[in-house]
Image (spheres, rainbow, N blue to C red):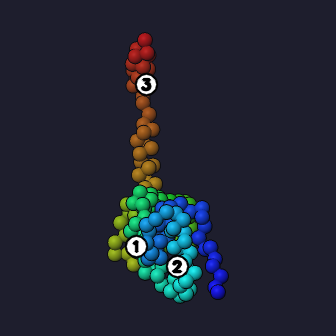
Amino acid sequence: MPEIRRLVSTRLKLKELQDICVGLGISTCGRKKDLLKRINDKINNVDEGEVDESIIANQEDLEQTSDPDFRFFREEQDREYEEGLRQDRIKGVERLVSEKKYSEISISDMKLYMDSKNISYTNVIEKSDLICLLSESIEGNDKKDMEETEEEDIQLNIEELRLARLKFYNNIQ
């Protein structure tokens, strides 16, 4: 007489047991005790290979019956995780760019960085061309920043400075 083993925990919730029943292709009706008995009987009576095939065959059914809020939450977590990885890669490229270690940047990371900075790299095939394009765009951005700071640092002559002080002190009172 074969030994009957309890394979499924009694601590599982009814919904979890129903999901297991769907996965095994057995009825989901009844109480928790009935579901536990059905699941254990199915696992004990069926050969190991047949269980694996039935689980694989019913995997899609299990995914369809799962909670849609959970699925939405899971997809949102996956998107956030992917975005975090993307941001980490961009930060790594920025660090290498600031150190001028262009040769250590992979092509995919370089393209990701260029996309994030809205730098067009169409018709660029080789890594050396990407490096040139990246270094040129960085130098161009540095020049623009320098020009902007120079425009901001315009000095006033003595008369303009005196008028500015008078306006300032008149507005305070």
Residue wearing tag 3: 161
Q: Quadrant of the N terminus?
A: bottom right
Viewer-proximal residue among 86 and 90? 86
Viewer-proximal residue among 48 and 36? 36
Residue wearing tag 1: 61
Q: How far from the left and from the top, in percent, is residue 76?
A: 43, 58
Q: How many marks?
A: 3
Residue wearing tag 2: 42
N-terminal of the pair, mark 1 or mark 2, is 2
Q: Is residue 158 above or below residue 47?
A: above
Between the C-alphas of marks 1 and 2, the distance is 18 Å
The residue drawn where x is 43% and y is 11% is 173
Q: Secondary structure at mark 3?
A: helix
Q: How far from the left and from the top, in percent, is residue 29?
A: 43, 66
Circle 2: is it few (<14), some (14-19), or many (20+) Cα within 10 Å? Answer: some
Dividing the picture into quadrants, the one containing residue 25 is: bottom left
